[in-house]
Image (cartoon, rainbow, N blue to C red):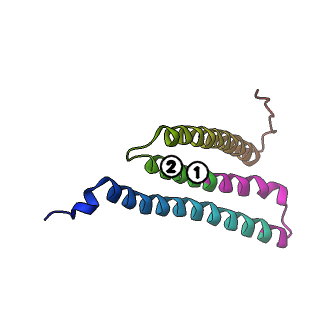
Amino acid sequence: MTLPEELLSESGVQEVIGWLVHAIEAAGALIIFAGAVWAFARFASTGLRRRSLISQFNKIRLSLGRFLVLGLEFQLAADVLRTAVAPSFDEIGQLAAIAAIRTLLNFFLTREIAQERAEIEHDRKGEPERHSVTP
C-alpha cells in the first residue's frame, strides 16, 4: 500500500505537520488552562472554607507551576515540530529565540517549584523555615 504522492511531497508533509502543531499547541494551552482553573477553584474553595490561605497557598502555587511547566513543554514541542521540514534561517532564528525564552521560563518555574516544595516539607516537619538568598 502506498501513500498518495501529494502526502509525500514537501507541501503535503508541511500540511500534516501544521495540523500536528496545532494539536500540540492546543494540548499545551488546555493543560495551562486546566491548571489555572484548578488552582483558582482550590484557592476559592480554601477561602470559602475559611481555612488558612497562607498554609495552602504554597501548595496551590506548586501545583499551578507544574501545570505551567508541562504546558510550556508542549508549546516548545510544537515550535520544534513547526521547523522540522525545510526551515528557513528566519524560522530557525525565531525557534532559537522562542526556545530560549521558554527554556528560561521553565528553568525559573522549576526552581521556584523546588523552593516551594522545600518550604512545604519544612512546614510539615515543623522545622523553622530557612530563607536562602540566591543570586
Q: Quadrant of residue 127?
A: top right
Q: Residue at the left extreme? A: 1
Is residue 54 found inside the magenta-colored segment of the image?
yes
Height in image: 15 above or below 95? below
Q: Are marks 2 and 1 in contact (CB under 8 Å)?
A: no
Q: Nearer the viewer, mark 2 or mark 1?
A: 2
Q: Quadrant of residue 107?
A: top right
Look at 63% across and 40% down and name the residue there: 101
Disc 1 crowd rating (10 Å Cα; few below 14, some 14-19, many 20+) is many
Q: Which residue is mark 1?
A: 72
Is residue 72 found inside the magenta-colored segment of the image?
no
Look at 43% across and 59% down and name the residue there: 18
Q: From the top left corner, tell me how far across and down residue 28 is, in percent.
A: 55, 59
Residue kind at label 2, given as amino acid type = Asp
Q: From the top left corner, tell me how far across and down residue 117 is, in percent.
A: 68, 45
Height in image: 41 above or below 108? below
Q: Which mark is residue 79?
A: 2
Look at 78% across and 56% down and name the residue there: 57
Look at 38% across and 47% down and name the residue there: 85
Q: Is residue 112 left or right of residue 47?
A: left
What secondary structure characterizes most of the magenta part?
Answer: helix
Disc 2 crowd rating (10 Å Cα; few below 14, some 14-19, many 20+) is many
Residue kind at label 1, given as amino acid type = Leu
Height in image: 74 above or below 104? below
Q: Secondary structure at mark 1?
A: helix
Look at the image and give the residue range highlighted in magenta: 46-66
Q: From the top left corner, tell me how far across and down residue 83 is, in percent.
A: 44, 46
Q: Secondary structure at mark 2?
A: helix
Q: Residue at the top extreme? A: 135
Counting residues from the start of the chain, the first of labels 2 and 1 encountered is 1
